[in-house]
Amino acid sequence: MTDFKHDVDLYGFSWLLFASSHGALLGGPAAAARTQYRAATERREIPGRSERAIAPAELWSRTLKAVWLDCRRGGESLLANVLLDEVDRELEKRGHAFVRFADDCNVYVRSPKAGERVLTFLRKQYAQLRLRINEAKSAVARVLTRQFLGIAFWRGPGGKLHRRVADHALDGMKDRVREITGRSRGRSVPQVVEELRQYLRGWYAYCRLAETPGVFRRLDEWIRHRLRQLYLKQWGRGPTIYNKLRALGASERLARSVAFGAQRWWHHASRSINQVLTNAHFDRLGLPRLAR
């Protein structure tokens, strides 16, 4: 599988072919995978693994068990890696820029005609493995109109393509943050920040290849905004808000202004309260920043 960060400049690759197999990978395809894997163990070329000094019989036994357990759990990614390794090799021989996860594959090409040509090639390759291309899911389309594994592309200066987080992945992330920072969960702000910290670190680790610092910066601002609102909601009444803000170092004028409009949580969270509940305050609580 091609590593886009280091190996490929997608300049000029305006089209992509998305190909997916039809149906499960068990039955006949699994038998084909066993045959291919036996051959790979004899060559010491194990798909997705480094060469190790393990007897072929023992290595085969371990891998077959892992494939079986993976399929029993409902996942077929490991079996797909074994079965489609030969397809990967053929795409690499032809010099294609591609990325595959399980049985879903994106091949980046320069024209619709090239995409159709590669699709015809993949139909033949899949047929040899007793698989069929899922024609309903597979398509040749513009790169900018498709996403894969939560990553999409945007075109920058000079026509160069850059990675971004796909819209549906951003929406899912925001829904999760809204859930964690809900005003009716009965949790303190430090507890909420701890839960956010665990979630955001995992989310950023997955999406860190996105080349959109402005999007990450706006997400940081939005998350802090929700936390400031949560503070005001939990403080509740005007006198409590006044006392809490004064204890945090707010001026008497600022504390009175916010306390007077005690129920305008979202309004105050985006304006005057920023002078007290600063970015540094949330840094001390352990809230990670997405913009780095």
Image (tube, rainbow, N blue to C red):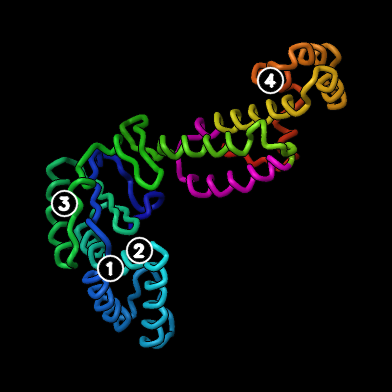
Q: Which residue is mark 1?
A: 26
**Three-letter code, disc 4:** Trp
Magenta stretch? 191-216
Q: Give the residue drawn at x 37%, y 54%.
A: 3
Q: Which residue is mark 2?
A: 76
Q: Is 198 colored magenta in this rendering?
A: yes
**Three-letter code, disc 1:** Leu
Q: Secondary structure at mark 2?
A: loop
Position in image of residue 130 (x %, y %): 17, 66
Q: Is 43 colored magenta in this rendering?
A: no
Disc 2: CA contacts within 10 A as few (<14), some (14-19) or many (>=20): some
Q: Which one is earlier in the sequence, the residue at label 4 or at label 2?
A: 2
User: Mark 3 and mark 1 in contact (Cβ < 8 Å)?
Assistant: no
Pick the residue in front: 157 or 281.
281
Q: Distance from label 1 to label 4 (Cα)?
A: 55 Å
Position in image of residue 195 (x %, y %): 65, 45
Disc 1: CA contacts within 10 A as few (<14), some (14-19) or many (>=20): some
